[in-house]
Amino acid sequence: MKKYIVAMLLLASISLKAQDKIGITEEDYQNSSVQMADGMRSDGKIYVLVTIIGIVLGGILVYVIQTDRKISGLEKRFNK
């Protein structure tokens, strides 16, 4: 039964397309600007974004360090 379900889903997925294929032109290779980043930089919002990313990464780093210290304490306690 599972084989039939997998085969049916495989056949259904072959016929589906997420989006149409768009050809790449020479102009696409020469484009070096990122419109979203330029707009955010001109509005001053890029600094807010960088700050938020820094806070999130800092929080993850603090969490990992605290967890490592707790695990090291437990290892010392159980290895005695």
Image: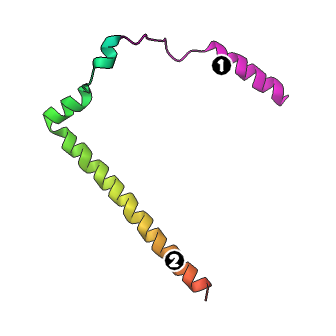
Residue identified by numbered label 2? 72
Q: Residues within 10 Å of mark 2 (few under 14, many from 20)?
A: few
How many numbered callouts? 2
Q: Residue at position x 51%, y 77% from top?
A: 72
Quadrant of the rendering where the C terminus is positioned = bottom right
Asked if residue 76 is among those painted magenta in the image, a careful observer would answer no
Residue identified by numbered label 1? 13
Residue 48: assigned label: none
Residue 27 image position (x, y, % from top left): 30, 13
Residue 6 image position (x, y, % from top left): 76, 26
Left-right relation of 68 to 36:
right
Vertical order, 34 against 66 (above or below): above
Residue 9 image position (x, y, % from top left): 71, 22
Residue 31 image position (x, y, % from top left): 28, 20
Give the SS element for disc 1.
helix
Give the SS element for disc 2.
helix
Whole-number angstrom distance, CA of label 2 to CA of label 1: 48 Å
Vertical order, 32 against 43 (above or below): above
* Start-end of magenta stretch: 1-25
- Identify which residue, 15 or 38, lies in the foreground: 38
Residue located farthest toward the bottom when viewing the structure as drawn = 80
Q: Residue at position x 48%, y 70% from top?
A: 68
Vertical order, 57 against 26 (above or below): below
- What amino acid type should be assigned to the residue bearing mark 2? Ser
- What amino acid type should be assigned to the residue bearing mark 1? Ser
Q: Residue at position x 47%, y 69% from top?
A: 67
Q: Residue at position x 85%, y 28% from top?
A: 1
Asked if residue 4 is among those painted magenta in the image, a careful observer would answer yes
